[in-house]
Image (cartoon, helix red, strand yellow):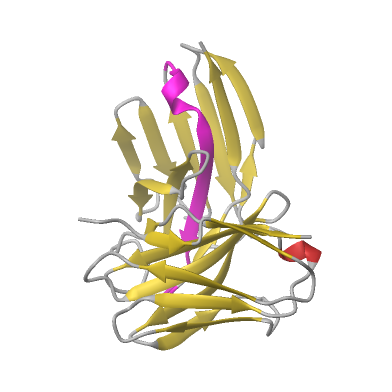
């Protein structure tokens, strides 16, 4: 069974640009969560999608957005990039909502560098 | 301010030593999870604890959930170089559809 895949693995952008990251969950998983990981702030929750609906959102500005398609694949978009957006962006999938009863499986992440 | 504080932040020990990592909060969580993350990979779930006072063992790793469900600890006996990695605790608050992660403990086990 294939794991969570994220593309691209590495990305370099300049300030002001926008970026789209993609995540393919494990087959059969309907919940996809996105996290931002930085050395200073650690792993922070961005948003969670289930059946194409955003069910929860973290404390990030509106420049961060996402969507989920009918096949459960998800994309996240960051507009007007800032230097502080440089981070590892992780996607995780689970059968239902991520909880103690539904294990969350993480992808390898997309390393975004903003110059 | 992190809702879940982990200590220590960094730990460098010799192979064979024992260690304990702590995950503390002033908030109550319905469950706590521990993950290990290696370079270039996403976190991998090690264990989930859901009951206050619960203790779970995974080979040389022992996990405990505090009685009040506000804290947790991870104890590793006779650490091996393969235990090297970033250890993260993550808490779930009732039906919130999200996990809150701790600040992480970076462990290096020297051969």
Residue A3: quadrant of the picture: bottom left
Say whether residue B25 is left or right of residue B68: right
Q: Is residue B49 above or below residue B56?
A: below
Say whether residue B107 is left or right of residue A107: right
Residue at 35% in and 25% down:
B60
Estimate the x, y position of residue A115 in percent, counting from the top left: 79, 60
Residue A113: quadrant of the picture: bottom right
Q: Nearer the viewer, residue B1 or A70?
A: A70
Residue at 78% in and 76% down:
A16
Asked whether the viewer can see residue B95, the reply is: no
- The question of residue B91 being in magenta is answered with yes
Q: How many marks?
A: 0
Position of the N terminus of chain B, as image quadrant, is bottom right
Residue at 30% in and 76% down:
A30
Q: Give the range drawn in magenta.
A: B78-97
Residue A27: quadrant of the picture: bottom left
Estimate the x, y position of residue A53 in percent, counting from the top left: 41, 89
Asked whether the viewer can see residue A44, the reply is: yes
Q: Is residue A44 above or below residue B15?
A: below
Estimate the x, y position of residue A106 in percent, counting from the top left: 41, 56
- The question of residue A96 being in magenta is answered with no
Q: In this view, does A34 lie above or below B78?
A: below
Say whether residue A9 is left or right of residue B55: right
Estimate the x, y position of residue A102 in percent, counting from the top left: 29, 64
Q: Which of A29 and B1 is in front in this view?
A: A29
Residue at 43% in and 18% down:
B80
Q: Is residue B43 above or below residue B55?
A: below
């Amino acid at each position: 069974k294939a794991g969570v895949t994220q593309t691209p693995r590495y990305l370099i952008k300049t300030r002001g640009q926008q970026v789209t990251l993609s995540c393919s969950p494990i087959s059969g998983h309907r919940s996809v969560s996105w996290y931002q990981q930085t050395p200073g702030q650690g792993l922070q929750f961005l948003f969670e999608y289930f059946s194409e609906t955003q069910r929860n959102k973290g404390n990030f500005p509106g420049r961060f957005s996402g969507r989920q398609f009918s096949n459960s694949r998800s994309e996240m978009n960051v507009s007007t990039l800032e230097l502080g957006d440089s981070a590892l962006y992780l996607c995780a999938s689970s059968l239902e909502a991520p909880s103690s009863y539904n294990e969350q499986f993480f992808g390898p992440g997309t390393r975004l560098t903003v110059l | 301010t992190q809702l879940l504080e982990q200590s220590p932040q960094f730990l460098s020990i010799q192979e064979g030593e024992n260690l304990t990592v702590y995950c503390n909060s002033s908030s109550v969580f319905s469950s706590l999870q521990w993950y290990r993350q290696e370079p270039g990979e996403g976190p991998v779930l090690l264990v989930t604890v859901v009951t206050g006072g619960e203790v779970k063992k995974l080979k040389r790793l022992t996990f405990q959930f505090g009685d009040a469900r506000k804290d947790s600890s991870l104890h590793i006996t006779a650490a091996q170089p393969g235990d090297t990695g970033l250890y993260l605790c993550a808490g779930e608050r009732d039906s919130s559809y999200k996990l809150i992660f701790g600040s992480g403990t970076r462990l290096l086990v020297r051969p």
